Each structure stands twice: as structure tokens, then as C-alpha cells.
């Protein structure tokens, strides 16, 4: 057996603080295992085993199997690979003890947590489901045991939905499978052991339903929370609460989502069984809810940088500060701490606390680089650059923007690489280095062309012309503006969307105005910049990139990786794809 997780709470000793009775500890461990995934069961078995060894006793093979199951369920973070072996050993011991229903659950968990391909695991789980159904028909497996095996297969299928040739059709089939599972378990809800897998089945059904029918998903998730409470499980249904709040956010019910999460945070402070990492996730989700509901989203929100923060904004900062503390204390998932720091750093930055923001963001870069965290480092550098500009340090900002652009290119992310290169060029121009700025704008324009965005390439070239004029004179600037003109025209010819055509026409107008300023009134312009080419449309500056480095959103490194996956905040589908996010089969609770 391995040690308990670092956030497990010790149990009270007996009267006088002396050694506890081994049989009392053994009874306690059995009760916790019987609860179906109790977070304290692993520690209880460890304590009971030590007490028995102290008096020369030993646990039975059946008890040993329960202890291995409980220990495997505690395997998280770096310890997760050990779970498969522990579950497999537990299955062997259950079989030796004649507990075939328990053995099937342990074998199913071993498959679900193993390193094999998901399709292979699904095939093995399908076979185990057939065996569970046969055992149940013969009266050798309980409803709760059979439902748990069925649920494990459904959960594994859910994690693979976005890899299917037709994800929507596969999701519909999975919803039907889960509906049958709920119908199988619901008539036996008087048995508390059945309510656990029933609650988890409803939660999974809510997750798979959310992308197509949020209202139906809310009904499933609320029923899942109610079943969890009715089951008598003393630990909080954190995953379901996060999912419920996430679906509420997608429907615009931010106030109700905040209420769900505030209740979860408050009850968690009183519940010693709430995992520390889950406490951090709840606070991250609540901060996201408050930002989205009140326009406080740091990346492009309505709270202007440097403006005094609102009381709601101060609550967001307090939540994120606590999320950083809890994620560090947990040590379960380093990426959770990275995300908490990114959110806290950007929250400080958007409220004008440049130095506090920089201190937190530099901690993201100070840690060792890990596979999949390139997007996190990109985001940290982009915000560090923004803070440096606001502190009047354009040279430092240019370095951070350039490093962020390099991170984007490593991820084959041409659009963000181009936008960051454009901002690096702006910072160099602000620093009084027109030659370097001109070269950086040229790199940005090349990247925009490669990404197929001719309008953005034209804007970068127009900005380059200003720097070229300062560094090398009017004649060379005119050449660059004519290149920008041709780029905008290429985009206009190949863009059918009306909004983008309007932006390109506006860009042509601005190029014409800059040529007017450059060559003087009454000058002969190239034919392409006449009124016919410029056309009509808005005269605004168009979308970023532009000369003003307002808050900008690099890719979020921890959004969900597919339509049916769940991100760290509890959002199904997340928003933007991320190479860093991977489907994970959750095994806490009855699974």
C-alpha cells in the first residue's frame, strides 16, 4: 500500500491518545470502503493494517482487496500510473475471496486507468459489462456493482466521443445507453449503495447532453446532486457542482452559477473530505463566473486597466489568491497551480497592479518546462509584456512579446504568432528603435500571409511604413504602403464575408490617407488607391492587430479539447481547443 494523499486528514485517536484498537480501525475501514469511494478509505486501511501488524495480525484477502481498491482510488497526479496495477491485484484477491461483483469493478477500473488506447479499453469494458449482466441475472452481482461496471464503460466512451468519426451520432448513442443505465438503477434507489452510481450516471448524462440541450442537461445534473445527497455520501459532489455551474454559465445564468459555486465553497470549508485540489478548482470556477457575469474577464473585459477595482473584482482577486495557495498545498497537479497563477496575474494586470501581476506571472515561467505547457508560457509572457508596457518598459515588453511569438510558432499557431510579433514591433517602436520595429512588423506581415489573413497583413505593413519612414525616409515608406495596398486588395478579392470586406475597404481608406500625408495634397496616387478601389465602409481602425496594445487573449492552455470534454472550470466543450488538454477518465467516487 502507498501513503495517503498529502491533503488527507488524520483520524482522532482513542481516549488518552494511545494506540487504537486494531479491530475498531478495521471496522472503520470496512465501513468507509462500503460507502463506495470514500476519500478517507485509503488512509483508514493503511492505519488498520499498521495496527494489525503491531499486534501480529493480518488482514484477510478480501480486506486486502478493498484496501488496494481504496489506495488506487487515491492515486492522482504523479501517482496515477500505479492505479492500474493496484486495481488488478485487487481484482485477483476479490476473485480468490469469491466476490465476483467486486472483482469485475476492480478489473473495469484497471482498464479505465490503464495506459492502453481508449478503443482497447472500451472493448475490454464491453466484455466486462456482459459478464456483469450475467452475474446479476444469476444473483451473484448486486445492482450497484453491475451499474458501476456499466458506468465505467460509459465514462470511457464519453472521453472518446470527440475522436469518433461522427461525434454527434456517438453522443446520441451514449445518451441512450446512459438512459438505460438510469432506468436499470432507479427502481432500486431505496438501496443507498445504488444511489452512488445512479448519481454519477445522471451527472455523465448531463455532461454528454450539455452541448445539444443545456436545459435537459441542467435537469440531469440537478437530479445527480440530489441523488448524491440522498445516498448519504459525506464527501461533496464537486465534479457535478462544477458541471452544473458550467452549464448555467453557458445559458447566461451567471448569478445562479455563482450561487451554486459559493455554496460549494462554503460547504467545502466545513467538510474535511473536500480534496484540496477540488477547493482550488471551485474557486477558479467561481472567479470565472464572476468575471463573465460582470464583464470582469481580464482578457478584453470592460474593466479598464488602471481603473479602481469594483468590490466584485476584489472578490475575484481573493478567490484566485486562495486558488493559488490551495493548488500549491495539494501538489496533485502542477498545471492547476500554473492556471491559478495565470488567472491571478491577469486579474492584477487588468486592475492596474502591474508589479503584483508581474511577480505572479514570473512564477509561471520560473517553474520547469513541461510537455503541453507551451500555451501557458505564451500567455504568461504576453501578460508580462503588457505589464512592462504599462510600467514604461517597452524594451522589456518587446522581448516578452517576441518570446511569446516564438512559443506560438512552436505550437504551429500562426495567428497568435503573428499577433504577438505585431505587438513586439509596436513595443520596439515605442522604445525608439524604428529599424528593429520595421523588421518585426515585416515578420508579422509574413506570418499573417501564411495564416491567410491579408487584412491583418496589410495592417502590419501599414504600421511598418511608419517605422520605415522614421528610419529610412519617405521613398521607402511609400514602397511599403503600396505593398500594403496590394495586400488589402488581395484580401478584398478573395473574401466573400461582408464584415471582412468592410474591414478591408476601411483599411484601403486608411492606406490612402497615409499616402496622402506622405506624398502631400494633390499628389498622383497609384490607381488602386482611388475612390473606386477604396470603396465605401467604416473608417475605424479595424480589429487587432493595431497600434494600441490593449488587453489581448492568447490561447487558454486549459480549455477543453473537444465538444464533449470538460475543462478544469467545469465547462463542457470549453471554448478554444488546446493541445495541452487531454481527455481524462475520472475514477473518484464509485468509479
Image (tube, rainbow, N blue to C red):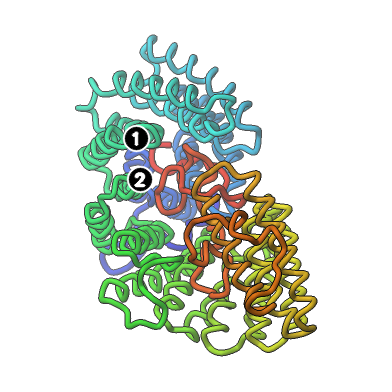
Q: Above or below — where is 282 with respect to 465?
A: above
Q: Nearer the viewer, residue 483 or 382?
A: 483
Residue at point 42%, 28% (across, down): 151
Name the side, left or right, on which 560 lies relative to 201: right
Q: Above or below — where is 160 with respect to 522?
A: above
Residue 589 is situated, as x and y percent measured from the top left of the image, at: 39, 42
Residue 336 is situated, as x and y percent measured from the top left of the image, at: 50, 61
- Disc 2 is placed on an element classified as helix
- Disc 1 is placed on an element classified as helix
Marks 1 & 2, CB-CB < 8 Å contact: yes
Residue 411 visible in image:
yes
Residue 217 is situated, as x and y percent measured from the top left of the image, at: 31, 35
- Mark 1 and mark 2: Cα distance apart in space: 8 Å
Q: Which mark is residue 243?
A: 2
Name the side, left or right, on which 471 lies relative to 130: right
Q: Residues within 10 Å of mark 1 (few under 14, many from 20)?
A: many
Residue at point 67%, 53% (across, down): 489
Residue linked to disc 1: 206
Residue at point 53%, 58% (across, down): 556
Q: Residues within 10 Å of mark 2 (few under 14, many from 20)?
A: many
Amino acid at each position: 500500500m502507498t501513503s495517503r494523499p498529502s491533503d488527507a486528514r488524520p483520524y482522532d485517536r482513542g481516549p488518552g491518545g494511545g494506540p487504537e484498537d486494531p479491530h475498531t480501525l478495521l471496522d472503520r475501514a470496512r465501513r468507509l470502503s462500503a460507502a463506495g469511494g470514500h476519500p478517507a478509505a485509503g488512509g483508514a486501511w493503511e492505519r488498520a493494517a499498521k495496527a494489525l501488524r503491531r499486534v501480529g495480525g493480518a488482514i484477510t484477502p478480501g480486506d486486502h482487496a478493498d484496501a488496494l481498491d481504496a489506495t488506487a482510488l487515491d492515486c492522482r497526479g504523479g501517482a496515477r500510473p500505479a492505479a492500474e496495477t493496484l486495481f488488478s491485484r485487487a481484482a485477483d484477491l476479490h476473485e480468490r475471496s469469491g466476490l465476483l461483483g467486486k472483482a469485475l469493478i476492480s478489473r473495469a477500473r484497471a482498464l479505465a486507468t490503464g495506459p492502453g488506447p481508449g478503443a482497447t479499453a472500451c472493448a475490454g469494458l464491453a466484455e466486462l459489462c456482459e459478464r456483469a449482466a450475467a452475474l446479476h441475472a444469476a444473483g451473484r452481482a448486486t445492482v450497484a456493482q453491475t451499474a458501476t461496471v456499466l458506468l465505467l464503460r460509459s465514462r470511457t466512451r464519453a472521453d472518446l466521443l470527440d475522436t469518433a468519426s461522427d461525434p454527434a451520432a456517438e453522443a446520441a448513442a451514449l445518451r441512450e445507453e446512459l438512459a438505460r443505465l438510469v432506468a436499470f438503477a432507479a427502481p432500486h434507489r431505496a438501496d443507498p449503495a445504488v444511489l452512488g452510481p445512479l448519481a454519477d450516471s445522471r451527472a455523465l448524462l448531463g455532461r454528454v447532453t450539455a452541448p445539444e440541450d443545456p436545459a435537459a442537461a441542467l435537469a440531469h445534473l440537478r437530479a445527480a446532486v440530489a441523488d448524491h445527497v440522498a445516498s448519504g455520501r459525506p464527501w461533496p459532489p464537486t465534479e457535478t457542482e462544477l458541471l452544473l455551474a458550467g452549464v448555467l454559465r453557458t445559458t447566461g445564468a451567471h448569478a445562479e452559477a455563482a450561487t451554486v459555486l459559493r455554496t460549494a465553497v462554503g460547504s467545502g470549508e466545513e467538510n474535511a473530505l473536500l480534496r484540496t485540489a477540488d477547493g482550488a478548482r471551485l474557486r477558479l470556477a467561481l472567479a470565472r463566473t464572476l468575471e463573465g457575469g460582470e464583464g470582469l474577464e481580464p482578457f478584453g473585459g470592460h474593466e479598464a486597466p488602471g481603473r479602481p477595482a469594483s468590490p466584485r473584482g476584489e472578490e475575484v482577486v481573493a478567490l484566485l489568491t486562495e486558488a493559488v495557495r490551495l493548488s500549491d498545498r495539494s501538489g496533485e497537479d502542477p498545471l492547476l497551480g500554473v492556471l491559478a497563477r495565470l488567472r491571478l496575474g491577469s486579474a492584477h494586470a487588468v486592475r492596474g497592479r502591474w508589479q503584483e501581476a508581474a511577480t505572479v506571472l514570473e512564477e509561471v515561467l520560473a517553474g520547469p518546462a513541461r510537455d503541453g505547457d507551451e500555451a501557458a508560457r505564451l500567455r504568461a509572457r504576453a501578460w508580462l509584456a503588457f505589464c512592462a508596457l504599462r510600467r514604461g518598459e517597452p524594451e522589456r515588453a518587446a522581448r516578452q512579446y517576441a518570446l511569446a511569438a516564438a512559443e506560438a510558432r512552436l505550437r504551429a499557431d500562426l495567428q497568435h504568432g503573428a499577433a504577438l510579433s505585431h505587438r513586439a514591433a509596436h513595443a520596439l517602436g515605442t522604445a525608439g528603435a524604428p529599424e528593429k520595429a520595421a523588421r518585426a512588423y515585416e515578420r508579422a506581415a509574413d506570418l499573417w500571409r501564411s495564416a491567410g489573413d491579408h487584412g491583418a497583413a496589410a495592417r502590419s505593413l501599414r504600421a511598418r511604413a511608419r517605422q520605415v519612414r522614421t528610419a529610412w525616409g519617405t521613398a521607402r515608406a511609400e514602397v511599403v504602403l503600396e505593398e500594403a495596398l496590394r495586400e488589402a486588395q488581395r484580401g478584398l478579392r478573395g473574401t466573400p464575408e461582408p464584415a471582412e470586406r468592410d474591414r478591408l475597404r476601411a483599411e484601403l481608406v486608411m492606406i490612402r490617407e497615409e499616402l496622402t500625408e506622405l506624398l502631400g495634397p494633390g499628389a498622383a496616387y497609384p490607381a488602386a488607391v482611388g475612390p473606386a478601389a477604396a470603396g465605401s465602409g467604416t473608417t475605424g481602425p479595424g480589429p487587432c492587430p493595431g497600434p494600441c496594445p490593449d488587453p489581448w487573449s492568447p490561447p487558454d492552455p486549459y480549455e477543453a479539447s473537444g465538444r464533449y470534454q470538460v475543462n478544469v472550470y467545469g465547462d463542457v466543450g470549453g471554448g478554444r481547443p488546446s493541445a495541452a488538454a487531454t481527455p481524462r477518465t475520472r475514477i473518484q467516487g464509485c468509479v
